[in-house]
Image (tube, rainbow, N blue to C red):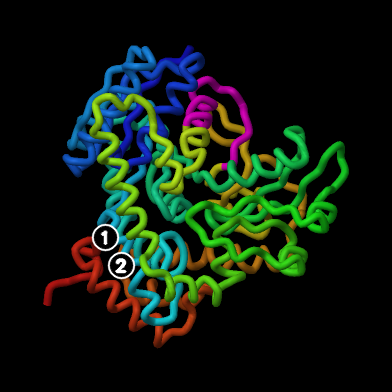
Amino acid sequence: MKEINVTVIGSGSTYCPELVDGFIQRQDSLKLKRLVLMDIDDRKRNIVGDLCARMIKKAGLDTEVVLSDCLDSALERADFVVTQIRVGKLPARYLDESIPVKYDLIGQETTGIGGMFKALRTIPVMAEICKKIEEICPDAWLINFTNPSGIITDFVLNNTKVKCMGLCNVPIDMLDDIKENVGGDADITYLGLNHLSWVTSVKKDGVELMDKLFTEGFAPKVMANIVDDGFDLDCLRACGGWPSSYLQYFYNRDAKLKHLKEDKKTRARTCMEIEEQLLKMYKDEELCVKPALLDKRGGHKYSLAACSLIDSIANDKKEVHVVNILNKGTLPFMADDDVVEISAVIGADGAVPVKIEPHWNRHIISLMTSIKAYEKYTIEAALTGNDIAAYNAMMVHPLIGDYARSRSCYEEMKDAHREFLPEFIKEK
């Protein structure tokens, strides 16, 4: 049994008990020797951390649990570092969602101009975290859950020496839904970028089932945090696969904007309410398990994705997982240094991409290359404070586009987030 030390940065997240539950479920193959829960928010770190400690004690794990607000000490002896930070917390997410709507733009935390600002705030902080990992625990694996996960992972892998994989619960949800319908031995092709991905092939005994499943009206479930407007059958046939839930923002753009304008409260407000309910529950010293309410927070199967990936690395299991990693020729239409979301064989040495047969079309190629250009411009803007790079990011993104409108929105959002954008906000 492999012994591991795990450090969670952003442990005040109410998702954290989900992660701990995952380690408890895998205690036969992973010995969690030390768990360090690091967060700069004292209140949330202590409430969430105390519940995590109670869960571990109840499960009978011989694990040292350390709560810390110091990044340097938290990284000491770490074998795995899990990042799940939210710079500016949920109030910043509220701004990402609410300001764009005033300009008839999609307000969403991982895509469009809202997602861009989340990345602009987050990349400088991740740069500091990675610098510390390089100094203190250079052999540790960074498992990144911080959104927008694809952009953040692209930054890490192309700008630091840290060993990193980006992770999301969207792929595991999609694949499990399909396997539940056609059988666990189905051969499924999944490809794309984080929150911009498709299942392009489902085979059983060598027979392609996509057309049959299209005709039968099957579709993977939509994520709980997204209003389901559905996908037209001709839309699915045109794009060449089942899109992940977040592509509803692209294919059902007007409907999504209408929802955002008409909803009485943003998703951020809902998350704030759920979070406070959860924190109140977590304070109960009799509570020793993750509560069912946690599923409404949007992180379904988060622990399964994270802990099974860590298990596969630690124990060199050579299991297949969908991860965000460097393309390295896997998709011929993407650059080698583009981070893509694909299946890979995971072992002690990292990820080896699974060869993908060409089940894509120009539609997928066009969207992936456009959004990757947006991601690269966003990374450049975050690192330099360059407005021109940010303008380019907005102009190539299909959900932003219009220069005059997006420029006005950009200026308002830049001012609203000025506390977290030191590269952009220069004192006169």
Up/down of 201 relative to 39, above or below: below
- Tell me the element at label 2: helix
Residue 35 lies in what quarter of the image? top left
For the C terminus, give its image quadrant.
bottom left
Residue depicted at 37% across the width and 65% down the height: 266
Up/down of 401 relative to 25, above or below: below
Q: Is residue 321 magenta?
A: yes
* 248 with respect to 180 (left or right): left
Which amino acid is tagged 1? Pro
Q: Where residue 301 sits in the image (x, y, percent)?
A: 51, 38
Which amino acid is tagged 2? Leu
How far apart marks 2 and 1 lie (CA) works out to: 7 Å
Q: Which residue is mark 2?
A: 95
Q: Where residue 105 sits in the image (x, y, percent)?
A: 44, 77
Q: Which residue is mark 1?
A: 91
Question: Residues at badges 2 and 1 in contact (C-beta under 8 Å)?
Answer: yes
Magenta-drawn segment: 307-322
